[in-house]
Amino acid sequence: MHGNVGVELGRRVAAAVQAALDLPVSEQDALIRPSKRDGVDYQSNIAMGLARTLGRDPRDVAADIVAHLDAADIVEPPQVSGTGFVNLVLTDDWLAARAGSLLDDERLGAPPTDSPRRIAIDYSSPNVAKEMHVGHLRSSVLGDAISRLLRFAGHEVVPHNHIGDWGTPFGMLIEHMVDEGRTGSDDDASISDLNGFYQEARKKFDAELEFANRARRRVVLLQGGHQETLALWRRLVEASARHFEEVYALLGIQLTPADVYGESFYNPFLADVVKQLSAKRLVKVSGGAICAFPEGFTNRDGDPQAVIVRKRGGGYGYATTDLATARYWIEERGADDLLYVVGSPQAQHFALVFAVLREAGWLTGDHHAQHIGFGTILGQDGRTIRTRAGGSVKLVDLLVEAVDHAARIAERTALPEAERTAVARAVGIGAVKYADLSGDRRNDYVFDWNRMLAMTGNTAVYLQYANCRIRSVLHRAGAEPAAGTPVLLTDPRERDLLLRILRFPAACAAATRDYAPHKLCTHLYETASAFSAFYASCPILGADSPQVRDSRLVLATLTSRVLTLGLSLLGIEAPERM
Ligand code: ARG
């Protein structure tokens, strides 16, 4: 029995097609969908497609499939409806038995993958000497949730943080450090205002020719491995790294210093990448630069699109580094999949890089490379979010503000001080993360405190609060129900809730397959809503009989487990009380 009900039914229908029509179809082809029709749980529309190929009446084909369906252990005798749908209704006995067995199952029925892959995932990836801004929020939050989902599915996930720690800006930053005499170890604090430091350097670079020239010479020294320059550069990188770690700790992002593979890490491989590409005759000199022209890409003028792999002066850029990065993760680290959680504006960049990698034979048919793009965070005015002064919003400020807002919710609880602080953190950070995760990642969304902290609707705090309500019922009940406690379905709302709970594996699978955490969010919201409807009309502790009470405690326990596990896969905490 497959833990995902839809998959199991798909297999059964596929076997029936084989038996009835002697046609091989996969469980995916059996097209099992949760049904929106009243009184129908799942539906298969495979008969329609088959009827077309066979030149038969779809209702006849559906009847044939039904006659050969071996699923009486799971579903009621199936009905054919409309133009040939096969309608499936799970039996109450099967539902009840399934609920009982889930109590023992930490994974709540979600089976681990039978084809685990090694997945290198690039996310967060902020830039040194610039403070992280909200643009990096999405990459961090989405990348972290996607990593958790993939790991839960049984894959080996290797995160790497591709921080921007190399290139021309470092010339001016280092030169500015020297000018200001901020080169001692006790000066680290003074460059902790990274944005300010960057802006000062930039201003000088634009205004003073002499400084700009020194900055350029400094870049050459840095790239040439000049010891003193490298030491100064390292100081800058470390100050930034500390700032990033602070943000990750606050956000509950699982990246560690060991996951940092900055652009500088790939520097030693760049020359060889270009050498290999030219040995494979994939590059041409164009305007003094060495460029690849991957097949099928044209620029605005309709000419072949160039990917610059070596600039005119001999330097390397962003694209070369990404070619080296991919080659490293495939060849040195044995990655099967390469995932990049980076804003949608970089879609073209990744498409070009992947194309060059394929032409070079570094990326083969067995590998899967994907840019997991996402939209922008907008302010209330519908434009990219800005501070009142017009600057870009700093991530830390936003997170601190989130916790402040949530503190007002926590204040209304009767919890002890320390627990209230923890709840404010869980609710505030959870709100920001969930706002980021609950919509289709490809869309922009408006950052709105009121909406993300609303106690009703598809928000983190609604789910967290629903879970706490259940925890409190379970607490008052004394003990969690023992595995094997019989489940009785006495009310349609009990059945609705249970059906939802049993769809958790399917929701997880869809969210993982499409790198779409919002599919899990939607499911959690539907589960919490089904619980609300159930709780409003089915008393738990005040049930008519001890059997019904225990049965309802099972449903409540499973709901709480779905919410807790689901939130944890999104990287969001579920407090016990609030
Ligand atoms: N540092 C880049 C930025 O802030 C993102 C890097 C994404 N990863 C990559 N392998 N290109 O835009």
Image (cartoon, rainbow, N blue to C red):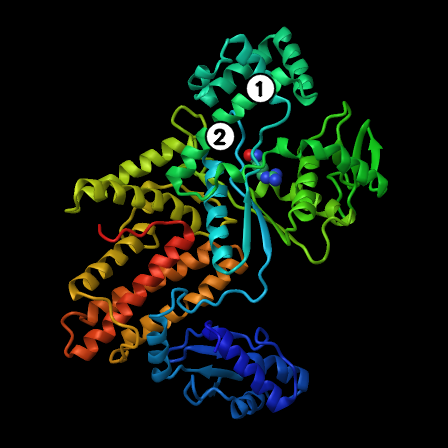
Give the residue number, with chain letter if any, for mark 2. 241
Residue 490, compared with residue 383, is above or below; it is: below
Q: Residue 167 falls in which quadrant of the image?
A: top right
Q: Is residue 98 rendered to the left or right of residue 13? A: left
Q: Is residue 557 rendered to the left or right of residue 392? A: left
The residue positioned 30% from the left and 77% from the top of the image is 484
What percent of the width, then of the height, locates residue 14? 57, 81
Whereabouts is ligand 1, in terms of quadrant?
A: top right
Residue 168 visible from this viewpoint: yes
The residue positioned 42% from the left and 19% from the top of the image is 189
Dot 1: what SS? Answer: helix
The residue positioned 28% from the left and 78% from the top of the image is 487
Residue 571, compared with residue 479, is above or below; it is: above
Give the residue number, with chain letter if any, for mark 1. 231
What percent of the width, then of the height, locates residue 130? 50, 26
What percent of the width, then of the height, locates residue 449? 33, 41
Three-letter amino acid code at the position of disc 1: Ala
> Which of disc 2 and disc 1 is earlier in sequence?
1
Q: Is residue 402 rendered to the left or right of residue 127? A: left
- Return the mark for residue 127: none
**Of the two numbered discs 1 and 2 in the rendering, the one whose residue sits closer to the viewer:** 1
Three-letter amino acid code at the position of disc 2: Ala
